[in-house]
Amino acid sequence: MTRSLALGLHAVIVAVTDEEPRILTVERRSEPGGSPVAALPFGLLEPDEHRTLELGLRLWVREQTGLELGYVEQLYTFGDRDREASDEGEGGPSAGERLISVAYLALVRESSRPSAGAEWRNVYRRLPWEDGRRSTGSPAGGLGSLLRTWSGRGRSSEARSERVDIAFGLGGAAWDGEKVLERYELLWEAGLVAEAGRDRGLDARAEPFRGQPMAADHRRILATALGRLRGKIKYRPVVFELLPTTFTLLQLQRVVEALAGVRLHKGNFRRLVDRGGLVEGTGRMDDHTGGRPAELFRFRREVLRERRAPGVGLPEAKGG
Amino acid sequence: MTRSLALGLHAVIVAVTDEEPRILTVERRSEPGGSPVAALPFGLLEPDEHRTLELGLRLWVREQTGLELGYVEQLYTFGDRDREASDEGEGGPSAGERLISVAYLALVRESSRPSAGAEWRNVYRRLPWEDGRRSTGSPAGGLGSLLRTWSGRGRSSEARSERVDIAFGLGGAAWDGEKVLERYELLWEAGLVAEAGRDRGLDARAEPFRGQPMAADHRRILATALGRLRGKIKYRPVVFELLPTTFTLLQLQRVVEALAGVRLHKGNFRRLVDRGGLVEGTGRMDDHTGGRPAELFRFRREVLRERRAPGVGLPEAKGG
DNA sequence: CAGTATAATACTCAAGTTGAGAATAATAAC
DNA sequence: GTTATTATTCTCAACTTGAGTATTATACTG
């Protein structure tokens, strides 16, 4: 007999609060009686009820978190056979069904209040090596040497080292903020994240760098989302989905930095933003800045018709 | 009772031959006895057989076209309820099943020979308004005025005009080669492509601009693929998947132009390619150029570790 | 074989963009 | 008032981009 299919809809709902990117999570117990883990909001497609996948997702998210989503984009569809065993919380597929999951990225404003049971959690607590705002060079820090040890072992050690170098910006390669998924997958293969330990041995020395695990392969989905968002921000004005209608230029910059995991040069950032015609002044002032009051700006919707691809370009630069 | 699901795997297999981008199609008869239409290679995921979606896709493609795919990337998952009625050729879902389709983009070399039943077809014969290589300004040409008429009608006429302007680079907006899907969807809504006529009235004046239809929503999938490929080419060295191991710089340029649908400035293109370190000379010459013999180059794999995001940037320029 | 067409390859140059830093202005806290 | 903190505006050299020109090596034509 043939196994049947279930289609899961997962949401990576991102907001930026207090200069930290956060995602909305719900609690899930992998086995009855087990300890709870953070999971992405998730539900199964109901072929008779949900006219489109995205609508199904919005319904599930409203039910589980109380949020009405605004900006939503499809991320990726995960369908490997070995991922599903671990993805069977409440509301999941029944035994014998193969689960395929379509993941979505949603952006909401920091003001959104989820209902009880759902909670905002810091993205970088789950992917600490992605935050380079306070370090210089590769944010990966202590992971570097551990990865080097790993990649030095076994056959195909050369191909491995090369992958590590490219992904983590080691050995002369440049750090690329968008390679979030590549980095996560290498850490998984190297047994340096807890999810890998569910099947394999776990390297204990990695403890301080590891980051908090999530249910099933949700951290991989999170990595996919962060990588995509970092890319998108450069050529589409999506940051504004995360900001209130008016904001100061520094607020805007901090949100971009939070997502990119990198500090930017202030003067150059401003130049870029207004050469791009992305914002316009409102004339009003914010005088709670801690220094000289700052003008409040708003997003100029008209850019969408003017420029080819308006985003808040991320120079690779640092400096406050 | 609840309807069950079927998961379709679709492949947009692209090659560039004679300076034209082509996709591999198979023939499908929508009803028994109906006339055959070009369709994308397609098969259903077999939950017990296919360990990953991508492997399932590769198997189906091999079976239907005889091709072993190299570069493959997931494109998008299509799951709207109204798309499926039309997607029931041989090998499709049984009645009462809801079909969700995961589409993939594959790049192969022009030399790949498909088996009987599969055929290469010119992408721009299906999306003629996307090829701007011989026109100046918006390649959309005659479609412009038809779209303007359409968008002028009805309520929400203002929002419509704006969408048309942005998508087609009219009214001061810039033509953006990547907005392929937006353009196709507008044409569909406007009743200017045959697929829309399956449900709605079709504007007869659009005949010469319309392009050839494909099965079900396969042309929309093609549009998604072309848009993605045009984007990708700029920041990842994927063009080389479409070229033989050695090639002249003009061959490389022609392939890029074919995909981008735009002519580029020769000197600047060369400068870009070798400043990016994308290629290296082989010392050998091609003397079948029709003019002075050209050096043969090969792709430098090492760029992958050096530069942040090496692609063959597309300046917006023209000129031969 | 001179003349013409075709393409390769190498330059040039002005205009624009980028990365980095410095200078000056307006507020709050002490 | 002095200091800290942030806002806002410049400057400047290095580099990139768009566009065009000049020179060279082939094949083809008559």
Image (cartoon, coloured by chain):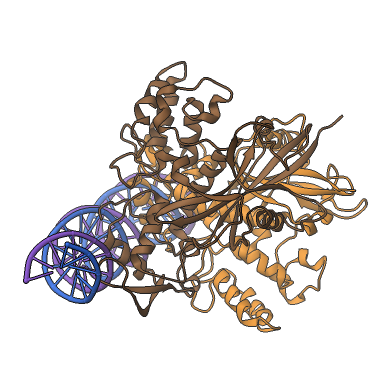
Chain colours: A brown, B orange, C blue, D purple
Task: Report the side of A146 relative to B128 (left or right).
Answer: left
The image quarter in which residue D25 lies: top left
In the image: residue A105, left or right of residue A284: right
| Residue in view at x 32 percent, y 62 percent | A269
Q: Could one spot residue A15 in this view of the protein?
A: yes
Q: Quadrant of residue A296?
A: bottom left
* Apparent side of residue A85 relative to residue A317 in the rendered image (left or right): right
Percent from the top left, x then y, of residue B244?
Answer: 52, 38
**Vertical side of B69 occupied by B250: above or below:** below
Question: Relative to the observer, which residue lies in front, B101 or A33?
Answer: A33
As drawn, which residue projects farthest toward the right?
B33
Judging depth in this view, the residue of B9 and B27 nearest the camera is B9
Task: Tell me residue B200's x, y (percent).
Answer: 81, 71
Circle count: 0
Q: Residue A57 at x, y = what percent?
A: 68, 54
Q: Residue furthest top?
A: A154
Who's the residue at 59% across and 70% down the image? B140
